[in-house]
Image (tube, rainbow, N blue to C red):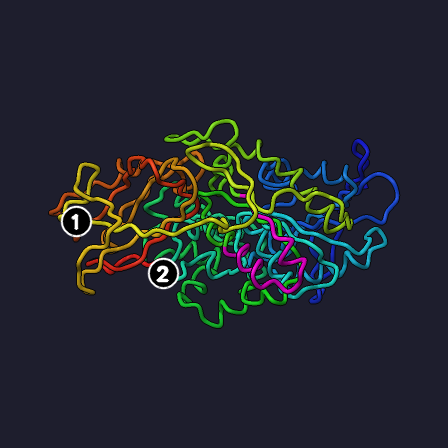
Amino acid sequence: MENRMGLYIDTSVAVPMRDRVTLATDLWQPAGTGPWPVLLARTPYGRTSTVHLGNPKLPDIRALVDSGYLVVVQDVRGTGESPGLMEPHRFDQSDTVDTLAWIADQDWCNGSVGMWGASYMGFPQWQAAALAPPVLRAIAPAMTSADIYRAWYSSQGAVSQGTLFNWSARMAVANLSRPRSDGPPDPRDAASVRAALEDVDTLYSLPIAHQDALLRGLPWLGEMLAHPDYDAYWKRLAALDHSSAITAPALNVTGWYDVFAREVVRSYTTMRRSGGSVSARDGQQLIIGPWGHGDGADLGVFPDRSFGPAGSVKAAAITPAHLRFYDRWLKGGVEVDPGARVRIFVMGLDRWREEDDWPLPDTRYEDYFLRSAGRANSAEGDGQLHRAPPTTTAATRTPTIRSIRSRPWAERHWASTDSPVQPIRPMWNAATTSSATPANHSRNRWRSPATSPSPCTCPRREQPAPSAATPLGLTGMAGSASTGGVLR
């Protein structure tokens, strides 16, 4: 164990699982004598990487240790120095529960364990919480989903192509670089997948069966694409379906442009309504900033929009929020002020606001209807938004935009989709490897009436109305159009 400036780091721990596989684990131990409350993070990205060391979306490990927490960071099975190949979700629940049991048996653990981590690191938190192990007292899942199906598919079964293919390609490259029991991998496979990562059109080309190298690197991709519906394959992974069994409170963190924003909000509202304990219901907290999912998309500054210094995740006091949360639930600090239950960044006003709950208690919902005379396929087209529904038949029903609105007007943006048989490529932000950013998509989706199978609406901005309210939240779409429609 190495002593570094008042803390001890043990990088040689092997934690045994029920099938006798041991997982590579680091211990960050405070100075002095324990036992201590423990914070666990399980990552597929390398336990020594900047994914969790110094990432501003996550709590600072050194601050956690200095505050009297022993921190455990583990490579999930098939990644880093843990043996095997990465098989997404297969061992997340069992390996996390086994790790929690091992921690609880150590002399340095005082019997209270919390978890933390973003993106894939959030999946094991919810998976373990669904089994309610007594030692797990709190979780802090950021930019993730408590329902694995909804991480990769929409509620109507549309695959989240950008998220899925990009992430899968990166995991495939890692797998293709690891030793295998069936012999060394073909180096051409890794080279092929790396090349696809540099070419969006190649990476997203379908059918997926033609991407042999990608499937050899990550067979799970073909397996999960064979289950586009919410069937038994996915139901066994849906922690949120067991919300009444989850007794641990959660600190939920996301961004308005995060690919998992809706899922984080859904986890919060579901647990507030049907969590398995008073602590799980009343202890839910939610932070939403003007951020996307990837590193670099969390600074509040994008090519087409800046939200000012307050928009940066560095200004959001993520570490203090975690410490208050853990002190309350792991140290029994009933006198600790946990802060506001909900903290949101109001875009347009570009400032943070504290709220009592989500949806906001004074929220009202308003429907807007898309209209055009058939030329809504450009920024100069005739697409409009109307509050009054059109007179129409079911066969030509106009899509509806559902807006969450409250308080004085700030700024409003609308967008819908084009024909699914001739899709429009979203604007790709190379700096953040994400299309989910505030970008002017009108530059990238011009279609003439002759080439567009049916009208499509473009991003538009309504002019401020004197008595209107501030739209907050995530818009939804409902209804159908001649292309097959967009569902809420």
Question: Considering only vertical position in the picture, is 415 above or below 390?
Answer: above
Q: Residue furthest front?
A: 467
Q: Residue furthest bottom?
A: 232
Disc 2 crowd rating (10 Å Cα; few below 14, some 14-19, many 20+) is few
* Residue 44 in view here: no
Q: Is residue 307 magenta?
A: no
Disc 1 crowd rating (10 Å Cα; few below 14, some 14-19, many 20+) is some
Which is more foreground, mark 2 or mark 1?
A: 1
Give the amino acid at mark 2: Ala
Report the side of 314 relative to 371 (left or right).
right
Report the side of 1 relative to 278 (left or right).
right
> On the image, which quarter does residue 14 sit in?
bottom right
Q: Is residue 268 magenta?
A: yes
Residue position for label 1: 452
CA distance for labels 2 and 1? 28 Å
Q: 351 or 213: which is nearer to us?
A: 351
Secondary structure of the residue carrying tag 2 is helix
Q: 195 or 488: which is nearer to us?
A: 488
- Find the magenta span and give its range: 266-287
> In the drawing, what numbered circle is on residue 209?
2
Give the amino acid at mark 1: Ser
Q: Residue furthest left?
A: 450
Question: Percent position (x, y) of residue 140?
Answer: 63, 49
Question: Percent position (x, y) of residue 133?
Answer: 71, 63
Q: 176 or 225: which is nearer to us?
A: 225
Q: Residue at x 64, y 61 (%)?
A: 128
